[in-house]
Amino acid sequence: MIDVEKYFLAIANTTSDMIHLNDADGRIIYANQATEKALGYPLNKLINTYAFEIIHPDDREIIKADMFTISRGNQLPAREIRLLAEDGSYIDVEVRGFLVSLEKDTYIGAIIRDISNRKKTEMELDGYRNRLEALVRERTLKLEQAIREIKTLQGVIPICFFCKKIRDD
């Protein structure tokens, strides 16, 4: 028989995703080593703190609602939020919560993925897209101006009605 706990800990401590287990009051009772690496908190400092202490204030209410929904046995899609790192900065993460039932107690588990690089890339792409759209608008205005000038010139230059050549008389 395999030692499931040993394998779970091996997986949990080698994955790059953060894994948390919260009690019914919202205290973090387990966090893997990826959490320490991503957020900078020593695990012994993070354990027994309330999860909401490291969640961005603007994201707390939606996570509170999500935790309530999950505690009722419902699943939710992953959600993007911000977590407070030990250095005071916030990192963008994608969190997927789930219900864990052990004996008489239930817990809220979470798999948390750092998406800071993805968000940075998305912002850069938005900047490129905005600059490209501005260039297209600018080019379109120039082309519209050129068309107006051509139409004006057509009205001024004498063109033969039959052969379409410019008359020089």
Image: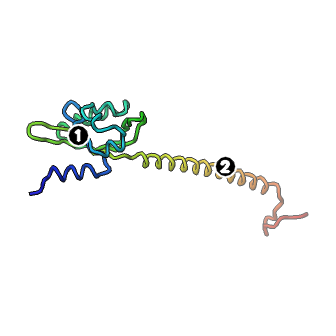
Q: Find residue 117 and report its horizontal and vertical position in percent.
A: 43, 48
The residue indicated by pointer 2 is: 141
Amino acid type for the residue under numbered disc 1: Tyr
Q: Quadrant of residue 33?
A: top left
Q: Does the rendering let one see residue 125?
A: yes
From the viewer's perspective, is residue 146 above or below residue 85?
A: below
Q: Quadrant of the C terminus?
A: bottom right
Q: Name the secondary structure under disc 2.
A: helix
Q: Nearer the viewer, residue 93 or 46?
A: 46
Q: Nearer the viewer, residue 17 or 92?
A: 17
Looking at the image, the residue that sits furthest to the bottom is: 163
Looking at the image, the residue that sits furthest to the right is: 169
Q: Nearer the viewer, residue 74 or 138?
A: 74
Q: Residue at x 58, y 51 (%)?
A: 132
Q: Quadrant of residue 41?
A: top left
Q: Quadrant of residue 61?
A: top left
Q: Name the secondary structure under disc 1.
A: strand
Q: Find residue 125 and report its horizontal and vertical position in percent.
A: 50, 50
